[in-house]
Image (tube, helix red, strand yellow):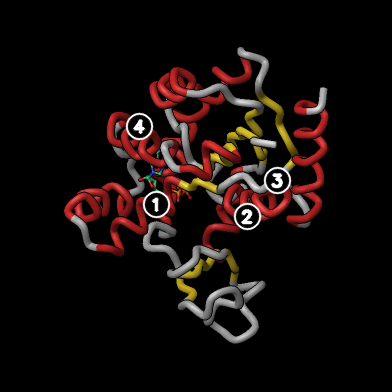
């Protein structure tokens, strides 16, 4: 089955963690625009060096650039065959409208976690530079700080600083909440409680997907 799913939620709500778990369950590719942009930065391309200023400051890239990235990614065989788990896109009403012009969507999941909780999660978050696996100071890899999955270096993200976190949360309220409302208006949104163990959150999302997709 090709699942076409969008994941919304504040920074630190668990979109990346849930996408990895859902990708295993449904076989749809996890497409994280943040990961793709960080890869471009790491590769040192000209585009990467332009993107870096946005990422470091926690500001959104222009919609046209993001749409170009998504259109290109959607042309790959895995998306055509298995759908997508979109994490971090769309983030504005413009992106949401442009997305709906090129594809239909089965469901948009909004992972709800209060601001106080995400602030705490983000300050302790650590990620693998190589494969993007997510850890925290409370749950480090078995051998600190080497990734259990790929052996890469596990670090704090450059934009997990108090200033950039503040700017990203502001952009979320200002730009992304209206995009979420658009999916609600279309009857495509389900809101899930994002507190508790990651596996429990996954179970809630799976129940919501199965109720919708098999209905
Ligand atoms: P977070 O959700 O924690 O901010 P992401 O990894 O999803 O982290 O995104 C990191 C950064 O990448 C954002 O702050 C922004 O600069 C850029 N970015 C990612 N997705 C988009 C998007 N859809 N539109 C514009 N900018 C984006």
Q: Which residue is mark 3?
A: 26
Q: Which residue is mark 2?
A: 20
- Residue sitting at 33 percent across and 51 percent down? 55
Q: Which residue is mark 1?
A: 36
From where the camera sits, is residue 185 visible? yes
Residue 140 picture quarter = bottom right
- Mark 2 vs mark 4: which is more N-terminal? 2
Q: CA distance from mark 2 to mark 4?
A: 23 Å
- Mark 2 vs mark 1: which is more N-terminal? 2
- Residue sitting at 30 percent across and 50 percent down? 57
- Residue sitting at 27 percent across and 63 percent down? 43
From where the camera sits, is residue 9 visible? no
From the top left corner, tell me how far across and down residue 2 is, in percent: 64, 36
Q: How many marks?
A: 4
Q: CA distance from mark 3 to mark 4?
A: 25 Å
From the top left corner, tell me how far across and down residue 79 is, in percent: 52, 40
Label 2 element class:
helix
Q: Considering depth in this image, is 104 or 114 the residue closer to the camera?
A: 104
């Amino acid at each position: 089955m090709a699942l076409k799913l969008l994941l919304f939620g504040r920074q630190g709500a668990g979109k990346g963690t849930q996408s990895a778990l859902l990708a295993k369950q449904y076989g749809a590719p996890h497409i994280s625009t943040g990961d793709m942009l960080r890869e471009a930065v790491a590769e040192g391309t000209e585009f990467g060096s332009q993107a870096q200023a946005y990422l470091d400051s926690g500001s959104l890239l222009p919609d046209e650039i993001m749409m170009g990235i998504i259109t290109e990614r959607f042309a790959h065989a895995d998306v055509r065959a298995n759908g997508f788990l979109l994490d971090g896109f769309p983030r504005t009403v413009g992106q949401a409208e442009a997305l709906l012009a090129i594809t239909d969507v089965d469901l948009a999941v909004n992972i709800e976690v209060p601001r106080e909780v995400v602030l705490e999660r983000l300050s302790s978050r650590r990620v693998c530079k190589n494969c993007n696996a997510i850890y925290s100071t409370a749950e480090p890899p078995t051998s600190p700080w080497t990734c259990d999955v790929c052996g890469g270096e596990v670090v704090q993200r450059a934009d997990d600083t108090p200033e950039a976190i503040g700017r990203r949360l502001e952009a979320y309220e200002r730009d992304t909440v209206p995009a979420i409302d658009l999916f609600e208006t279309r009857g495509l949104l389900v809101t899930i409680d994002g507190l508790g163990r990651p596996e429990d959150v996954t179970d809630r999302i799976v129940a919501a997907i199965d109720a919708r997709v098999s209905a």
